[in-house]
Image (spheres, helix red, strand yellow):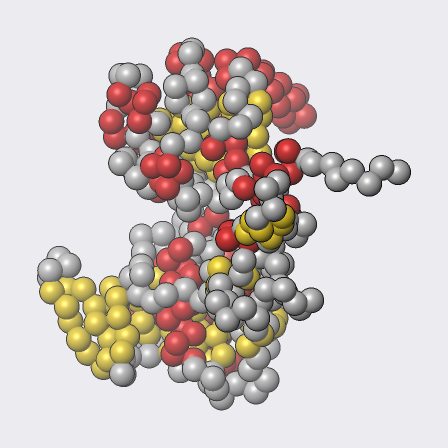
Amino acid sequence: MSDIIRRDPRAEWIARNRLHPLHAAMQQTQQHSWMGPNGIIRKNLHGIGFIGPNGIKRIDRSGAQQGTSNKRSAAVAVELPLHQVTQPTFYIAVVPDMVGGRLGSHDRDLLGLARSLAGSDGAVLAVVFGEHKESNFSTAGVDRLLIVEGDEFAGYAPEQLVQGLRAVDNQFNPRHWLLPDSRTGGGELGRRFAAAINERPATRVWQVKEGQCSGRAGAGQQDLVRGLPRLILAAAECADPVSETRHEALPEHLSTSVARCLSRIEDLGPVAVDPAAIAMAEAEFIVSGGNGVKDWQLFHRATVALGATEGASRVAVDDGFMPRNRQVGATGTWVTARVYMAVGISGAIQHLQGIGACDKVVAINLDPGCDMIKRADLSVIGDSAAILQALLEAVENYRNGAKRDAA
């Protein structure tokens, strides 16, 4: 075999491009220093350092990380230290909203507050009703996980949920109960539960410090400071989420079954809502169009068929194809959708900032090297009109098949 060193321009390009999905993998073989063509030693400053336990890149300027066999590559994932509570002295119970079956940003803030209240002797007990899709309870700060299953908790059943919380309270006797003071269920459930256990809760709490809690009052214009009660309804950003430790999330079980109560509320099931009426900041599924969309009528039909909320890039808004309130990005609306589909959007930095909190990003674009393709979890390279038309046909075939099966 030849001794000539062969270059891989594509691998070198990926190693330089921090937005590329394979960037971290290429860092394992990337050289930190090499001899240039004129005899001068060249150094790659981006390759020096390692990823700390909180995910931030650290650079050791002492030189210990360079030129040794124990050098840690930037691409090597550092396992977070494990926090264990073998025999908890007390529990801090958290009831997350779990919108869409996953922990939201408000839930993670709540778990961060619970972690600070638990300290080293207490354990954070997360109480989840029904099925869920979350797989990262351990990195969110959960020491014990209690899943209360049963079809009686499905749908809108606040009275039955209160019965379940009372069963948890009787068995574990938590020192504090934490629920999100939100419109997605936690605020109502927390107030119902407070009435059931005869506790006066602290509401809209945004800070807990030295045995005191501060909550918003007077239409958000004043702060109400009081002693820390047993039941806390916390607002968003009440604490920093857990990021530097991982936890066991050991399963727990109720020793007794939850009694089925005779509900005074009849759940008539979900009501169809026009996706166009949903605010983009609260939408779970968003399809955005950009400069690459040439057939806007087809785009609108596709979003209706998919049941998605419409969004747009700044270029599409400036050109008059979409209203200003549908602009996504740092100069528009910051979105937290579970699925964000970008059609014909190249991915300006302001737009990428606006979708930074989205769970899954799907990109449809003709340019395989654009920044949106690099950010996306799933990319489709091709003409947007042809792909949207294929999506319409696929949705129609799926629905027709479901109707035939039902018949």
Percent across and percent down for residue 172 are 49, 81
- Residue 126 position, x and y percent, is 49, 68
Regarding residue 110, the answer to whether it shows in the image is: no
Q: Which residue occupies 62% across, 49% down?
A: 34
Seen from the viewer's position, the closer of residues 150 and 86 is 86
Asked if residue 40 is positioned above or below residue 347 in the image, the reply reads below
Give the number of callouts.
Answer: 0
Q: Quadrant of residue 352?
A: top left
Q: Answer with left or right where residue 122 lies relative to residue 291.
A: right
In this picture, is 109 found above or below 200?
above
Q: Which of the pair 163/32 is nearer the observer?
A: 32
Counting from the top left corner in percent of width and height, residue 153 is at: 50, 57
Tell me the quarter of the image containing the C terminus.
Answer: top right
Q: Is 365 left, or right, of 191 in this rendering?
A: right
Q: Quadrant of residue 222?
A: bottom left
Residue extending farthest front: 38
On-image quarter of the N terminus: top right
Q: Residue at x 26, y 70 (%)?
A: 207
Where is residue 404? Give x, y as percent.
Answer: 66, 21
The reply to whether residue 220 is visible in this rendering is: yes
Pick the front one: 271 or 139: 139
The image shows residue 78, relative to residue 88, as above or below, that is above
Tell me the residue at 42%/61% (across/down). Answer: 108
- The residue that appears at 47% across and 33% down in the rendered structure is 371
Taking the image as shown, residue 228 lies to the left or right of residue 6, namely: left
